[in-house]
Amino acid sequence: MALLTYRDKHILSAQQLRKLSEHKYSCFSASLLDPLLQPWWNWLVAQTPLWLAPNLITIVGLILNVVTTLILICYSPNGVEAPPRWTCLLCALGLFIYQSLDSIDGKQARRTNTSSPLGELFDHGCDSISTVFVALSACISCQLGHYPNWLFFQCFCAIALFYCAHWQTYVSGTMRFGRIDVTEAQFSIIAIHLVSAALGPEIWLTKIPIVGLSWNYTILVFITFGYTLNIINFLKMFTQGGSGKNGSSVAGTSVLSPSIPLTLVVLPALMIAQKSPQNIFTEHASVYILAFGMVAAKVTNKLVIAHMTKAEMEYLDWSLLGPSLLFLNQYFNCIVPEIWLLWFTLIWGTQDLLRYCAQVCLEICQHLRIDLFRIQYTPKGAATHPSTASVSSQSNFGSSGSSADKNGGSAHRKSKSKPH
């Protein structure tokens, strides 16, 4: 099945690869924090060696973010147990490093003249995974496991809004960031981790004087407010229409078409959690969110590719196998323990996502004649061989262009929604 699918055939057609080569990254941002952080990002990229590949910077940040979150999950898998303070501090550090590295990878691509559509795609792919871990870590840090419905809402809202950001890009051709967007959300979560590290995660369960509500409810109000602003900006897309013919998407498809893959992820997740006789979400919240998060990351990556290649998005996907089995198992009165199928969903979805991304990157690298984690670098004073110059020129083929680099950020990326 999926284990053999990606090995036996190409994922991207010749026409998609040609469209990808022509792709130009377009971005508009009104972020409040981005201009304030530019001096830090500019200083940081100036300290980065010129031989360091931008995609390597991206993947290192993602690995740090994932590892620190997994450590937090080990101590509080359901968000009920209070994790040690040092794990919250570790998450804050991991997210700050990820955010910083994710903001300079595009700058590094420009200063090394290695911008390409592959860099933008790779950045979005890493962000799709990071979104799941960042949202889950924030919920665990402020002890939302005591309110399972809120935990579900917050995590799946983050996942859905990341998808919607790319849905909007698929329709309009331009990625847009509001005043309160990814950077603001990331630093808010860093602040949550730091408060938990300084005062202990239990602080979020204490009651606010006079009001009588716990502090984590205050967090919920602010986060939900941010979600609402993003949803309002997203809905404006339907009144403005798409950039394609007759108000269609960049691929000439209906502006509503991306709603189908998202529905096939979120709706089963909600139904399975609510109908589970074994309380699978409440008892195994982290595994549940990670399992469906990997499925969501896969369909989000397919949406990004559809946008960059101006192609129609496929609705059905092998990553939906796990959720389908969970749903059918409940229909037949759970003949298989749900936790077994949940772990299968996580393992299957993760391997499917990684194999898919690896195959896509391989095909693009072969088409553009570049390496994923290596760039051509000539030390100062060394003679430039003609063949080296030729490869360097090929590496820059399909550069996303400087117009995408709002506020000096990444043209090769800067995904906020993070869109890059």
Image (cartoon, grey):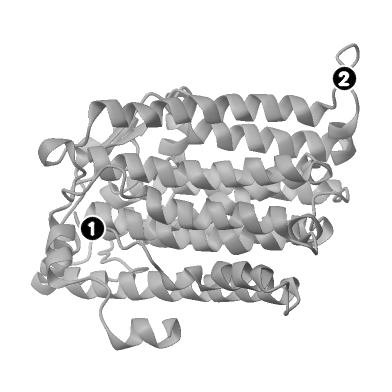
Secondary structure beneath dot 2 equals loop
Residue 115 appears anywhere in the view? no
- How packed mark 2 is, by other alpha carbons closer than 10 Å (few <14, some 14-19, many 20 or more), is some
The reply to whether residue 358 is visible in this rendering is yes
> Residue, x 35% and y 37% (percent of image)?
409
Considering depth in this image, is 149 or 48 the residue closer to the camera?
149
Give how far across and how far down residue 331 sits, in percent: 65, 69
Vertically, is 419 above or below 395? above
Q: Residue furthest front?
A: 332
Q: CA distance from mark 2 to mark 1?
A: 50 Å
- What's under tag 1, amino acid-wise? Glu
**Which residue lies at the image location 50% right of the left edge and 45% below the top edge?**
160
Where residue 176 appears, x then y in whole percent? 34, 33
Q: Earlier in the sequence, mark 2 or mark 1?
A: 2
Quarter of the image with the C terminus is top left
Q: Quadrant of the N terminus?
A: bottom left
Question: Is 49 or 379 nearer to us in this picture?
Answer: 49
- The answer to which quarter of the image holds residue 378 is bottom left
Q: Which mark is residue 31?
A: none
How crowded pointer 1 is (Cα within 10 Å; few <14, some 14-19, many 20+) is rated as some
Position of residue 308 in the picture relative to residue 82 (left or right): left
User: What type is the residue that disc 2 sits on?
Assistant: Ile
Identify the residue shown where x is 36% and y is 84%.
5
Please give left or right for residue 379 compared with residue 230 in the image.
left
Q: Which residue is mark 1?
A: 312
Q: Secondary structure at mark 1?
A: loop
Where is residue 385 drawn, in percent x and y?
13, 71
Instruction: Identify the residue position indicated by label 2 in the image.
Output: 208
